[in-house]
Image (cartoon, rainbow, N blue to C red):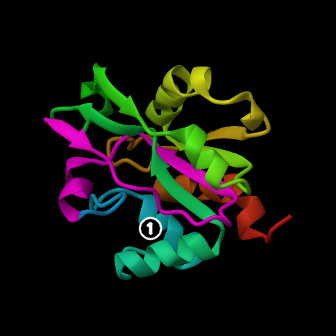
Amino acid sequence: MIVDGFPPIAEKSAEVLILGSMPSVASLSKGEYYGHPRNAFWPIMRQLFGAGPELDYRKRSRILIEHYLAVWDVLQTCYRPGSADANIDVGSIKINDFNRFFEQHRDIKRVLFNGGAAESLYRKHVLPILNSCFNYLEYQRVPSTSPAYAAMSLERKTMAWKAALGIVVNGRQ
């Protein structure tokens, strides 16, 4: 099926961009980033910022924005049966416009990849066409919050995300 992603959760003040690959079927049906009930993203955000899945989606999004975080996906559109990144038809992908996004969000200095698929897609399809004026961006992969990545406990994932977001958790630099 052809899958269309969401617009970013972002304001001009964002300092860190969290990137996934493409929303899951569950996320698409709910109209929310990380909408699968077993995805660890919102439980991790609860531990770090109080933005847990029990809150209304708009409230959770607002909390992330208040902590200078932005959320988006590498892909704007693709053909993908089901939710697995491995099922993405590489020939069908259309990436989001990162040159425009970073131009509009000049305070972003770091990009966190939510798992290996997001990082791989970005490095292959975005970096080669990203304007060199954005060479200052720092990149880091964090453990995937997907329920498909069960090799790491929620506690260990939370610790890794906390370390990666330390600049935001401990105050702005």
Q: Quadrant of residue 15?
A: bottom right
Number of numbered discs present? 1
* Residue 3 image position (x, y, % from top left): 22, 41
Residue 132 located left or right of residue 73: right
Q: Is residue 7 part of the magenta span, yes or no?
A: yes
Left or right of residue 110: residue 7 = left
Residue at point 26% right, 44% down?
4
Residue 107 part of the magenta segment: no
What residue is at 32 percent from the left and 42 percent from the top? 148
> Looking at the image, can residue 51 be seen?
no
- Quadrant placement of the N terminus: top left
Q: Point out residue 22 in the picture as x, y percentages from the top left corner.
A: 35, 42
Residue under label 1, please give it.
43
Is 120 placed above or below 26 here? above
Seen at 37% across and 74% down, the residue is 53
Location of residue 85 (image quadrant): top left
Of the residues shown, which amino acid type is indicated by label 1?
Pro
Q: Is residue 34 left or right of residue 165?
A: left
Please say whether residue 168 is visible from this viewpoint.
yes
91 on left or right of 81: right
Q: Residue at x 31, y 63 (%)?
A: 32
Q: In this view, does 69 lie above or below 67?
A: above
Other residues around mark 1 within 10 Å, as few (<14) / some (14–19) / many (≥20): many
Front residue of 9 and 81: 9
Residue 110 percent location from the top left of the image: 70, 47
Q: What element carries label 1?
A: helix
Quadrant in which the C terminus appears: bottom right
**Residue 122 in the image: x percent, y percent?**
52, 30
The stretch in magenta equals 1-30
The quarter holding residue 2 reads top left
